[in-house]
Image (cartoon, rainbow, N blue to C red):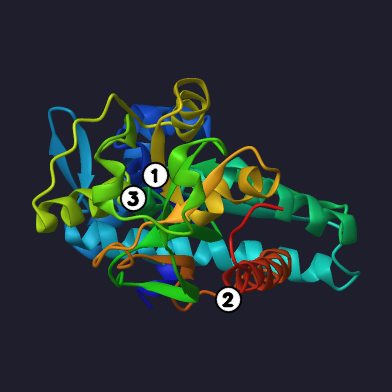
Amino acid sequence: MLSAQLQDTALRYLLEVVRSGSVSEAATRLNVTPSAVSRQIATLEDLLGVPLFERRPRGMVASPAGEVLANHARRNALEAERAVSDIQALQGLRRGMVRICSSSGFAIEFLPRVIAQFREQYPGMQFQLRVCGPQAATQALLRGDADIAVTYSRTAERDIAVAYRGAASIYAFMRPDHPLSQHSHVTLRQLQPHPLALPDAENTVRQLFDIACSQKGLVFDPVLVCNQFEALMHFVLYDGGVSIAGGITVRDRVLRGELHAAPIRERGLSSRNVEVQTMAERTLPEGPRAFMHYLIVQLESLAAEKLHRA
């Protein structure tokens, strides 16, 4: 059968070329010669009778057939990893690796705390946490580079399974001595007189903020725009201005009394969700599966909690 002739080595080489976009780069990562990689790709193309890559001046891009085969190779590799993990899990969760991709807000305090708590029960577990934008987190799942994505989403994604979805309010945050700290919630118009620091345009909080401002006919001229929450937060603390973020991002600092946060009550600002995502039709290994269940319990607990100062 044709499927039986698809060798593991050839598929592994193909997958590395897809990831790197270059035969020479793939060869370096695989610790083999570029000619060895080229031969394996050529063998696959001869076997299947279709080109698997488009050769371009700046590298190689998988053809539609190449993408289909790469997806097959990714799933095979993930299933092999799961088999090894499940065998190890027969002795209990003594060892294992959990690969997480998350939006930056989750990685500041929430995920490190949840990981630490999980490791109190299973100290042999190891974690890889990659921080990136919401769309990049989802794409990491589809490439097989992550087991779990913790991110914000506004639309459904093809080939993604959503294990948890919860509403994600947007908060204005400020110093506890700020005039707006007396309010349990605020409106966009109430923010206008105050110096405002905003995330950059790639941030989903900023995108929804801009849409809501446009609908209200409000124009803001932020004094600071930055793609790092810590910089926005420290500006607020030093300058006494206001910034915006998701509740999970600011929760711990609010509970410690370092900041005050008030939900922004405007139509359209609640159209994004917190999501825990996995690759559709993939069975996670025991370790990532156990951590995902623990993570969801923590998110459900936060969803039931009212954000306020301790």
Instruction: State which quadrant residue 283 falls in.
Output: bottom right
Secondary structure beneath label 1:
strand
Q: Which amino acid does label 2 sit on?
A: Thr
Residue at mark 3 to residue at mark 1: CA–CA distance = 7 Å
In the rendered structure, find residue 81 and report the number of the disc placed on it.
Answer: none
Instruction: Please tell me which residue is depicted at 66% across the width and 71% down the height of the picture.
Output: 301
Choose the circle earlier in sequence order: 1 or 2: 1
Q: Position of residue 307 (x, y in %)?
A: 59, 60
Query: Which residue in the protein does label 3 denote?
Result: 205
Q: Do the residues bearing badges 3 and 1 touch, measured as CB atoms within 8 Å?
A: yes
Q: Which kind of residue does numbered mark 3 sit on?
A: Val
Q: What residue type is labelled 1?
A: Ile
Q: Mark 1 points at which residue?
A: 244
Mark in the foreground, 1 or 2: 1
Relative horizontal placement of residue 297, taking residue 58 as reference (left or right): right
Q: Can you identify the residue that label 2 sits on?
A: 283
Q: How far apart are marks 3 and 2 (CA)?
A: 32 Å
In the picture, measured across the screen, residue 37 lies left or right of residue 223, that is: right
Q: Measuring from the top left, give residue 75's x and y in whole percent.
A: 47, 66
Place of residue 77 in the rendered image (x, y in percent of width and height, measured from the top left): 54, 60
**Quarter containing the N terminus:** bottom left
